[in-house]
Image (tube, rainbow, N blue to C red):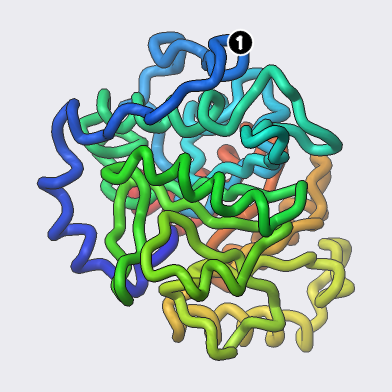
Amino acid sequence: MPFTRLLVATAAALGAALAGPAAVAPAASAAPASATSAPSIAAAAPWSSVQPLERAHAHNDYEHDRPLFDALDHGFTSAEADVWLVDGELYIGHDGPDLARTLRGTYLEPLAQRFRENGGSVHRQWRDTFRLLVDVKSEGTAAWPVIESQLADYPQLFTAYRQGRVHERAVTAVISGNRDLAAMQAATTRFSFYDGRMGDLGGPLGAELVPLISDNWTKHFTWLGVGPMPEAERAKLRTIVETAHARGQEIRFWATPDATAPNREALWRELVAADVDVLNTDDLAGLQSFLLAEDPEEQAAA
């Protein structure tokens, strides 16, 4: 997950700070109950029985019956929330804002409660960091300060950048979609990070700002899992991953095949073999089954 290649020692040093039920500050202000209510954590599956899956990312997570909770119940360690800024509040939605659901109520508060009840982690007895990918659909310059303000209400929960140093916590928020790079670069303190694109690979932006580089698979590769992967494309994929990892950054592709079919799993196998960090899916059970069966890292952790 974000920063683990760069900050392994930091996570160990912060273990004590992440423990205890009072670690997360209460929200400074709450939206109306209709906009912030979330499923009861008690309704979730037994957390201790779920193996956290390091590569598993819930694309369009908010479209599942139980946003966040369905992903966590399948062991996912990354989830995506599309947000819209409307009258100073951040609402969830893909094609437009759902005014019954807020970022705070659907993700921030449930993550904070999970953190408290698990003694400082999102998955029980798992000390890595969960990624919350916040995909801004409305104008980014106005939205980012509001996102930052809400994340700042949970200083013990969210990874922070302060005066040139990254302080890793249980959840790392990464801003995608309409991003305000200039404002994020200028901030001396922030609780979110920038989702880069392939043009940022090997460039001047380091992992302290850009821990993740994401891009559309079809813009860089022609192979969609049918037949063998062309050797030139396989070599290109591995070079991309190696370049990112050398700088402490992670790689994610979207627009990979996601319908249940052999070509989907063929492409996933190549991503795992190349050590791509994040596999994107809307099929939670499908990716969970695949990773448990075919990812050597998950087999070693079982």
Q: Position of residue 62 (x, y in %)?
A: 67, 31
Residue at image location 62% in from the left, 87% down from the top: 239
In depth, the one of 285 and 152 nearer the eye is 152
Q: Position of residue 66 (x, y in %)?
A: 60, 20
Residue at image location 39% in from the left, 10% down from the top: 42
Q: Is residue 209 above or below residue 122?
A: below
Q: In this rendering, does residue 47 appear at all?
A: yes
Tell whether 145 sits left or right of 215. left
Q: Please state, as top left, top right, bottom left or bottom right, where the N terminus lies in the image.
A: bottom left
In depth, the one of 44 and 116 nearer the eye is 116
Q: In this rendering, does residue 273 appear at all?
A: no
Question: Circle 1 sits on which residue?
Answer: 34
Tell whether 12 sits left or right of 283. left
> Residue type at mark 1?
Ser
Q: Please state, as top left, top right, bottom left or bottom right, where the C terminus lies in the image.
A: top left
Residue at image location 58% in from the left, 50% down from the top: 133
Residue at image location 27% in from the left, 47% down from the top: 127
Q: Position of residue 97 (x, y in %)?
A: 77, 31
Q: Position of residue 11 (x, y in %)?
A: 23, 59
Q: Is residue 55 above or below residue 64?
A: below
Tell whether 149 sits left or right of 10. right
In depth, the one of 133 and 286 nearer the eye is 133
> What number of labels is visible?
1
Q: Is residue 201 above or below residue 287?
A: below
Q: Is residue 230 above or below residue 108?
A: below
Quadrant hosting residue 10 = bottom left
Quadrant hosting residue 110 = top left
Disc 1, SS? helix
